[in-house]
Amino acid sequence: MPWKKVKLAFIANARKTTYNKRQKGLFKKVYELSTLCGVEACAIVYGPYEPQPKIWPSPQGVQTVLSKIQNNV
Amino acid sequence: MPWKKVKLAFIANARKTTYNKRQKGLFKKVYELSTLCGVEACAIVYGPYEPQPKIWPSPQGVQTVLSKIQNNV
DNA sequence: AGGTCTATTTTTAGTTA
DNA sequence: CTAACTAAAAATAGACC
């Protein structure tokens, strides 16, 4: 990444800012994949800074996806 | 993106190759966020080309995350 | 079908406000 | 803390193999 190459490993000094940015970017990616290819996709992230998990596209959507998993996995 | 700016919308002519690449990239992003910030994260994608959903990091991991959702959402 | 290459877009770490 | 800016890294559409 910019300014210095961040090694891809557990970064102890990962900042909240970095987490926020990446999470935002991740959800955007999910949105892009879903929209671009018209596929069902969902993502759930448990940030260390928030008690509630971040869910995309919505808790309902995740539940829908999950119900399918129950039958397939 | 490269060669031409792909409009962010439902692309009827979205190719399987594009889907495969983006899915791969998405999972990588999830991995990066999870590893970099040490957070629990999962992603599920239902590709139109495969009957089984693609799950990250694992069905078990998703279940773990899901159990928490039940209580929070 | 999947891997590689390249040009270009997108993402993003750190800074600054 | 949130947001904008910047420059460098990463992702990626299409071509080619």
Image (cartoon, coloured by chain):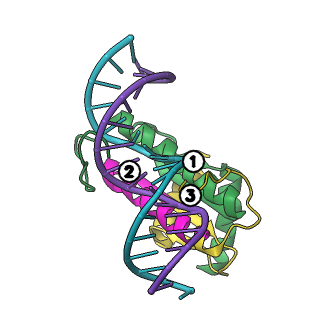
Chain colours: A green, B yellow, C cyan, D purple
Find residue A9 and report its horizontal and vertical position in percent. Answer: 25, 56
> Looking at the image, which is closer to me, B69 or A40?
A40
Residue holding disc 3: B3
Q: Is residue B64 visible?
A: no
Q: Quadrant of residue A4?
A: top left
Find residue C4 and report its horizontal and vertical position in percent. Answer: 37, 77
Subunit of mark 1?
Answer: A
CA separation in Å, label 3 and label 1: 21 Å
Left or right position of A38 against A9: right
Give the residue drawn at x 56%, y 55%.
A43
Left or right position of B61 against B8: left
Give the residue drawn at x 65%, y 80%.
B50
The magenta segment is: B18-42
Asked whether the residues under the numbered discs 3 and 1 touch, taking CB atoms below 8 Å apart as contact, a structural biologist would say no
Residue holding disc 1: A28
Q: Can residue B29 be found in the magenta stretch?
A: yes
Question: Of tags 3 and 1, which is closer to the observer?
Answer: 3
Residue holding disc 2: B39
Judging from the image, what secondary structure is the residue with disc 2 in? loop
